[in-house]
Structures are given as structure tokens and as C-alpha cells.
Amino acid sequence: MAVQAAASRGGRPGPFATAAVLAGRALDNRWAPRIALCLILIFSFGGKAIDLSQPCCKVHKPDLIFDESYYVNAARVIVGINPPANMPYHEAPLYKDPNAEHPQLAKLGIAAGIEVFGDDPTGWRAGSILFSLIALIALYALVRACGGGPWLAVGASAVMTLDNLMLVHGRIGTLDIYAVAMMIVSAAFYMRKRPLLAGLALGVAACMKEVALALLFVFVLLEGLQVARVWIAEHDDLRAALIARGRQLGLFVLASAAGTVGLLWLLDVLVPAYDPGTHITYGGNPFAHLAHMYDYAQLLKAKPGETGIASDPLAWLLNEKPINYLRVAVSTSAGGKVVSTHDTYRFEGVMNPFIIFLAIPALCAALAAAWKTGERLAALGACWCLGTFLPYLVGSAVSDRISYLYYMVTVMPGVYLITARFFGSKWMPKAATVGWAIALIYGFVHLYPIRTLL
């Protein structure tokens, strides 16, 4: 428009006007969002893969980070490697899964990495990096399935890339990123009205880590919200809405149950789960294995006055009680005294503050839009946040269930959706969106665990 206006006045367009037009044409190209997504994937891969063998070393061996000590050693046992004497599962029988409190599938992913790349950091963590990239692609697909534009989908994936909690879990050999990636895949199928595929994908997610089943609550809330809107509006098609939504939800639940139980049965046959405490092997009976996982979870109770890394779910919304997964620091001495200390590696279980601190206003905006207009992306984002967070809150309040800030890893996809939507809204000033993007980058850099690069 600026170029045309200048031409109509007989003048030549300025360089800024020309650049703006060219940029607008480039952004309007249908391939531009996909190219942007590819760039995000490259950036995400590089941010996780660089210095993958670090921090190092204890007795010339790379350190295991946080819960890698359980899951990597369980994967070692699965492939027939006896863990070192000071490590968990040293006495466990080989070719079984000694971490019976969780399903085997994600640990098989770690085991596959060990078989392909060797018993080293690349082998332990390659699967996490792969599934973190799958999660980014799936989040893009989920936004599009909800009716969001391609650039909004790119924005949601970018927000996810810049979150420290997802970065760390996409780089270490733990189970959570495997489950989260398949949860997002399941949601994308569901929003495209493919409940059977969605249910089967959720079954895969649940066999990676059972917390993925919280997605069932998400879609119960989502369908309940949609039916409530129809009922309050006193539409004549309330019965039709109940039947249609009940059918989709019912197929999803049945497929999820069948997928979870069937896949867990197959896993128990191929790689039996073994409980080192009771010496019981769960092979071929998925219901006994499920009961064991449930009983184990019930034992995880918070103790009054106990200090440590446990925290209340409400504190997570303020980014409180971050977890020090692993820290390596270098000290500088002068005259026999330490004069300065700086971190070389700092892996923390904490979220980008410029994401989590905006979760509540973004949630309120999403709920308002979902109720007023029925916007699918707003409805799903809000229901994801509530459906995955409230079980932790209720469990902590009612049964004193112990909880940790990193549990937010299953909640955060919903937060990415609502915050990206919030700042991608037409009424949001572009300056505010640009300012938020700059703040996200600052938060990412400030928390980035490989401090030697900064």
C-alpha cells in the first residue's frame, strides 16, 4: 500500500516501505510458516544436542542427570548391561524392566538409543531429543486442527522451544517428553475428529508414562464445556450435541483403555516388569501391573515439615521451588581464597518465567473466548491447563500426594497454546507481542543450561 501510494503521488517508494512490502509478500507465502517451523526445529535440535556428553565426569564417565539414574539404568538392564555397583538396579535380573512403577515403553526408547549409539550420553538422550522434536511438530498440527492459522501454530511451537522446562526434559534421558509428545499427537487426532486414532495414541503415551492419561480429563472438560454452551443457549439441538459429543468422547475413552491395556500386556510379555522390592515379576498380566503402579503412586505422600524438592502445585504457578537437576561450577581463587564462582552447567527444573507468569491472564482470556464464541483453540488450551493441573492440585490437597514442579511438563502444552493465542490475538498491540518475544528469548538465555556457551 505504501508503494502504491508513493507511486500515485509520482514519488519513489522509500527503502522501508519497499522492505515492508517484500516482507509482507514473503510472510503471505504458504510455505513461509513451514519454513519457519523447520528453522525452529533446527534451533531446538541444536540447543539440545550441543555438548550432549557434558557435564563430565565422575571417574571419567559422564554424569547422569536427575532421574536419569533410574531410567537409564533400567534401560541398561533391559538391554543386558549390569549397572555399576553404586547405581540403582545393580542387582536386578537382566532383560527385564526393574523400574516397574512406570510402563516400559519410554525406557525401551532409551534402550534403543543405547543399542544404536552405545551406552553413552548420545544413546541415553537421543530418544528424548527425537520426541521433543515430534512434540513441536505435533503442537503445530494441533493448533491447525483447532482452526488456528499457520503463523499462530508457528508461534506456539516457538514458545515451546523457548521454555526451559521442556528444553531440559527434551535433552535428558527421562520419560516425560516421550509421554508429552504422544499426548499432543493424541490431541491433534481428537480435534480432527479421529477419536479412535486419538485413543490409540493416548494408549501409547500412557505406556510411556501413566500421567498421560490426564488427557482424558482434558477432553471430558472440553466436551462438557461445549454441551454447556448449547444448553445455556437453549438450542434445539441439545440432544444431537449430546449424542455427537458423547459418541466421540466414548470412542476416545474406549480406544484409550484398549490401547493402554493391550500395549501394556504386550510390553509385559516381551520385557517383563520386575519390582526389586518384592521380587515380583509382572509378565502377561497388565491389570496386576497397573495395580502395582497405582499402589506405588499412593505411597508417595508428603510428610509434614519435610524439606527437599517437593512443592505445592499452587507454588508452580509462581515458578517456586525450582529443582536443581545438576550443577557444575568453576571457582577462581586468589591468595588461597575463593574470589568468584560461575556455573558451567546448570540444569534446573524451572519454567521460563515470561511464560508461566502470564498463564493466569491468558487462561482467563481463553475461557472467556471459549464460552462467548466457542473458539476451539481457546477451549482446548483452557481445558488442557485445567484438566492436567487440577488432578495434581486435588491429589495434593485431599490425599497429601507428594508433588514436584517438573510435573508441570504435562500442563505446559496447554500454557503454550493459551499464551501464544493471547499474544497472537488481533486486539493485542504488535509492540506488546514483540516485547513478549524479546522477554521470552531473554528468559531462555538466562536459564539455558550450557553456561559455557554464554
Image (cartoon, rainbow, N blue to C red):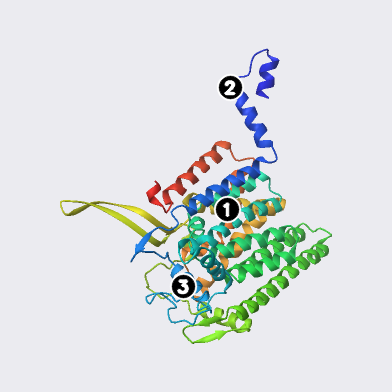
Tell me the kind of residue under disc 2: Pro
Q: Earlier in the sequence, mark 3 or mark 2?
A: 2
Distance between mark 2 and mark 1 Cα atoms: 36 Å
Amino acid type, mark 1: Tyr
Callout 3 touching callout 2 (CB < 8 Å) = no
Give the class, few, some or many, for how many residues have Cα within 10 Å of label 1's Cα (few <14, many ≥20). many
Residue drawn at x 42%, y 54% as measured from the top left: 449
Q: Is residue 375 visible?
A: no
Disc nearest the viewer among 3 and 2:
3
In front of the other: 134 or 127: 127
- Position of the N terminus by quadrant: top right
**Residue closest to the eye, 208 or 365:** 208
Q: Position of residue 317 (x, y in %)?
A: 49, 58
> Residue 297: image x %, image y %?
52, 77
Residue density around tag 2, few if under 14, some if 14–19, many if 20 or more, within 10 Å: few
Picture quadrant where residue 430 is located: top right
User: Mark 1 to mark 3: distance in Å?
Assistant: 32 Å
The disc placed on residue 416 is 1
Element marked by disc 2: helix
Residue at image point 81% right, 66% down: 243
* Residue in view at x 50 percent, y 55 percent: 167
Q: Which mark is residue 73?
A: 3
Q: CA distance from mark 3 to mark 2?
A: 60 Å
In x, y percent, where is residue 383?
Answer: 63, 60
The residue beneath circle 2 is 15
